Image: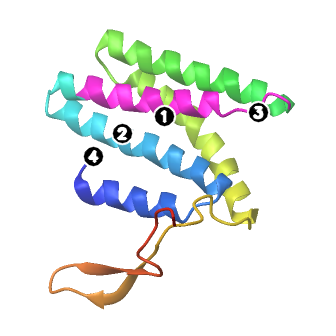
């Protein structure tokens, strides 16, 4: 993942509420899948394995964050475990079909998570962070970002 993509995800996380964080995690998985496809086309299997590691890390985080007091968590757990097995299958067979099978499952979940995030009007999880606004100023070849608010994000003594 390139530097600009990482900065984009960072800015999204800073301003996200709980539901939006889940959508961002799905977007992270999709970004790593795209990286894996690109690395696979370049015949760089070591990079593909790193991309698989990143995908698995994000999916495991989704598994850890499930609230098992709700019945849907058990169903999500099973689907996430299926995705992890499919990525492991791709790793062993050194091909991407398992990853694509995992993507088809995640695509269906993503639609639901994105709809849920649109309805969630809770406040962002990070409270003492700077607001980042893009589009107020333009550079010669790129869009510039501005940070608004208090620059002191630490603790006050």
Left or right for 36, reference 29: left
Residue 108 location in percent, x, y? 63, 41
Upstream in the sequence, badge 1 or badge 4?
A: 4
Q: Are there few (<14), some (14-19), or many (20+) residues within 10 Å of tag 1?
A: some
Q: CA distance from mark 3 to mark 1?
A: 16 Å
Q: Label for residue 58? A: 1
Q: Against 70, is 10 above or below? A: below
For the magenta stretch, what is the residue range?
Answer: 48-69
Report if the CB atoms under discs 3 and 1 are less than 8 Å apart. Answer: no
Confirm whether the magenta stretch covers residue 57: yes
125 in magenta? no
Q: Earlier in the sequence, mark 2 or mark 3?
A: 2
84 vs 109, left or right, is left
Residue behind mark 4 = 1
Give how far across and how far down residue 19 sits, in percent.
67, 53
Residue at image x 62%, y 28%? 63
């Amino acid at each position: 993942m390139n530097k600009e993509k990482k900065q984009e995800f960072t800015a999204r996380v800073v301003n996200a509420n709980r539901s939006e964080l889940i959508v961002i995690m799905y977007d992270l998985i999709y970004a790593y899948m795209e990286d894996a496809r690109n690395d696979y086309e370049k015949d760089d299997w070591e990079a593909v394995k790193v991309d698989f590691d990143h995908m698995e890390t994000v999916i495991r985080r989704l598994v850890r964050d499930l609230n098992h007091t709700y019945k849907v968590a058990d169903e999500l757990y099973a689907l996430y475990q299926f995705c992890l097995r499919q990525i492991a299958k791709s790793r062993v067979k050194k091909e991407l079909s398992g990853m694509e099978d995992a993507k088809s499952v995640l695509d269906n979940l993503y639609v639901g998570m994105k709809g849920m995030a649109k309805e969630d009007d809770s406040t962002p999880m990070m409270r003492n962070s700077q607001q980042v606004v893009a589009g107020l100023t333009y550079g010669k070849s790129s869009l510039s970002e501005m940070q608004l608010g208090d620059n002191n994000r630490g603790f006050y003594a």
